[in-house]
Amino acid sequence: MRRADLIRVGVFVLAAVALFLLPRFISDFRAQQFAYVGIYFIALLGLNLLTGITGQISLGHGAFMLIGGYTTAILMSNQDPPLEFFGHAFTNDMRDIWTIPIAGLVAGLVGFLFGFPALRLTGLYLALATFAIAVAAPAVVKKFDGLSGGGGGINIFEVETRTRPVETTDPVTFETISEPIKILGLEIQSFNEWLYYLCWTLAMVMFGVAWLLLRGRFGRTLRAVRDSELAAASSGVNLARYKTFAFGISAFYAGVAGSLLAIATTFVNPDTFPIALSIFLLVGVVVGGLGSLWPLVFGAVFIHFMQIEWAQRVEGVIPDFVPILGDIDTDAPGAPAVAFGVVLILIMLAFPGGAAGLIRTLRSLTTRGYDRVR
Amino acid sequence: MRSPRLVLSALLLAGAIATGATAASSADPGITAKTILLGGTSPLSGPASAYASVARGANAYFKYANSRGGVNGRTITYTYVDDAYNPAQTIQATKQLVEQDKVFAIFNSLGTEQNEAIRPYLNQAKVPQLFIASGATTFGHDFKQYPWTIGFQPSYRAEGWIYGKYLARAKPGAKVAVLLQNDAYGKDLLAGLKQGIARSKVKVIAAEPYEVTATDVQSQIAKLKSSGANVLALFATPRFAIQSYVFANRLGWRPLIVNNAVSSASNIMTLASEGGTNKAVENSISIVFLKDPTDAKWRNDAAMKLYRSIMSRHAKGANVKDVYHVYGMAVAYETVKVLKAAGKNLTRAGLMAQTRKLNDASNPFLLPGIAIKTSATERFPIEQALLQRWSKGSWTSFGGLWGYRAG
């Protein structure tokens, strides 16, 4: 191992420890919000592998998350008719965590297959084709309403197979006793905390896998495809193989993220994965920095908090001291969306390279000239 | 500390503080000596953002109520957040309201699927899901499984039933064609209609469902026309209701059109009339339970004067003609009343107990005579409505109140 890699592994371990300890310092609710950040981080890692590294734009990753989310929800809750695969009938008997890899594989397979028609498309045309999946997926789901619950979706809040602290009432004292979640010898008291650890454990593992994949030959090849397909092909790169693989891996990440989203929200319906989600994911990758890995965390923070929290409290986002804006009616219809757009434009103006670009700039200020060239 | 007396008094003081602290923390979340915190979701953005006026109207009324002394010495803060009409966001926003903002109750959250999505969570957490803005029958029907949930507006089943009863009386032998949204809302209305026409000569001879995601309903309307029906019932959201009027007119079909309350706001009817050229809208029938701010009948009505003054003071710039603001005020009025009745020692359980024995005919924003009633076994607050007819650009109500009776 090179010295730089040793430092990276050290930082990774430190980050893991910090993530492990974080829930002790934040409220239970914040832990849940950071769990969502972890989920988006996984999805962004996957999308970035495809768009940032391999140069294939996808406006349809929400659809791969949908596949993952529905796979999990159906495996956890389906009763009638039982789903039979490989001689095993899945009738409401699969624990949530075991559905995660299956959700990833199903989405990955669909992504891999989608990679074939995508081979013929480049640039804008590919963006449009992927966008079409994002548009079509919710409607397709509604078609199979026997399995998917149609527009009403599937509520897995009350499903037995969901991991959660079990509350029972003591027959003598009538007090509510909460049985903690037990995993690997640890006892976790709240669902939100459990969710946090689940999401971030997977996020760290999948981050590590992405890093390992991209640091060697495979990553170099994908970057070559991005920079010039012609040059890559003439150096002996099998374009079809690498592009379909990139689609497959990327969709696997999205599938895992979708599965976690279903577990976290305890509910899926077609609107859980709207067209806007696909666009937000791309926004997250750009805010994090195209082609980067760990700075994507900032993209994940941005899309989660911007969507859920900051845009809600528009007064806080648009400061009063900007006189040009005048007296803004923050209660007006569409105000959150406008706030989101304005903030996004400001960020892109200030940091065109996203968080990764900002970090590079800061680093180049502190290091010597010859390092800057890198 | 030298003297034992000092130690003793110190201990007593500490004990007093400790008991004081526990007494304060034993109250339900969202309640302080001076405030009551309510929270809810509203589609401030997204496809249903027209309904955002419901939350704004309610908020304006709470501000008015606070300016008049609030509820038993407490003022109401109503935090409504955007869910973009997306149930997944409804869940996240609701969890935020309950777990972070620590609201006393979830109030007036809008949408059928949105409320179905949060119902198990709120019931497990024992947080009131108060006066849901959806008419789906399940919210009133399934109270045994979900005792912390209660609706407000007439259920879709009751609405369909009223149309059925009216047709049985006014158009015996009518052949009815139905366009319905393919979900609980459309099916509830159709079931109510069928219940209303039972034992009469009126028959539903065709029913065409459409998906929410559909782009238009042209083929459904063509099929319904070819069925030979002379009544068309539109159990559809505004966009599809407008399309139905337009397509029926183009096909030269002139049935009596029954249009559900979801799509019967005056501005929607005006759009459907295509600038007065589309005569298919004339004589449409719908139900109404609120005082319509565009109806000349209420121009000098005390409640509508109050409505306009509240709007001008607490919802500056909002469209006063929007009937959804009136809906918001009606539900906020009832909430203030229920909170008052629940007393100074306000608890979540105490609030729900009040919602099980509503009997109030005084809500000034509802049509005169409409009583809000519930009991231990009956959880549909509003079950009465008037019928109204669209003529020359406005609605006119006719006949007496219709009250839904199950069975």
Image: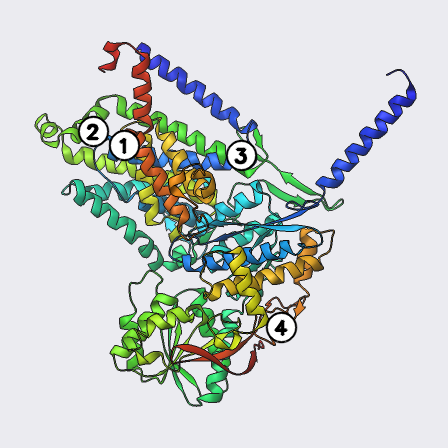
Residues under labels 2 and 4: Cα distance? 69 Å
Mark 1: which secondary structure? helix
Mark 4 on the same chain as mark 1: no
The image quarter containing residue A208 is top left
Mark 3: which secondary structure? helix
Work out whether A146 lies above or below B207.
above
Which of the two discs, 3 and 4, sits closer to the camera? 4
Q: Are marks 3 and 4 in contact (CB under 8 Å)?
A: no
Task: Find residue B300 and report its horizontal and vertical position in percent.
Answer: 55, 74
Residues under labels 3 and 1: Cα distance? 29 Å
Three-letter code, disc 4: Ala
Residues under labels 4 and 1: Cα distance? 61 Å
**Mark 4 chain:** B
Three-letter code, disc 1: Leu
Which quarter of the figure is the C terminus of chain B placed in? bottom right
- Residue at 51% from the left image edge and 59% from the top image edge: B312
**Mark 2 chain:** A
The image quarter containing residue B12 is top right
> In this figure, which residue is indicated by the disc labeled 4?
B371
> In this figure, which residue is indicated by the disc labeled 1?
A49
> In this figure, which residue is indicated by the disc labeled 3?
A193
Mark 2 on the same chain as mark 4: no
Callout 1: few (<14), some (14-19), or many (20+) C-alpha neighbours within 10 Å?
A: many
Q: Are marks 2 and 1 in contact (CB under 8 Å)?
A: yes
Q: Are marks 3 and 2 in contact (CB under 8 Å)?
A: no
**Mark 3 chain:** A
- Residue at 50% from the left image edge and 62% from the top image edge: B325
The circle drawn on residue A222 is: 2
Callout 2: few (<14), some (14-19), or many (20+) C-alpha neighbours within 10 Å?
A: many
Closer to the camera in the image, A75 or B16 = B16
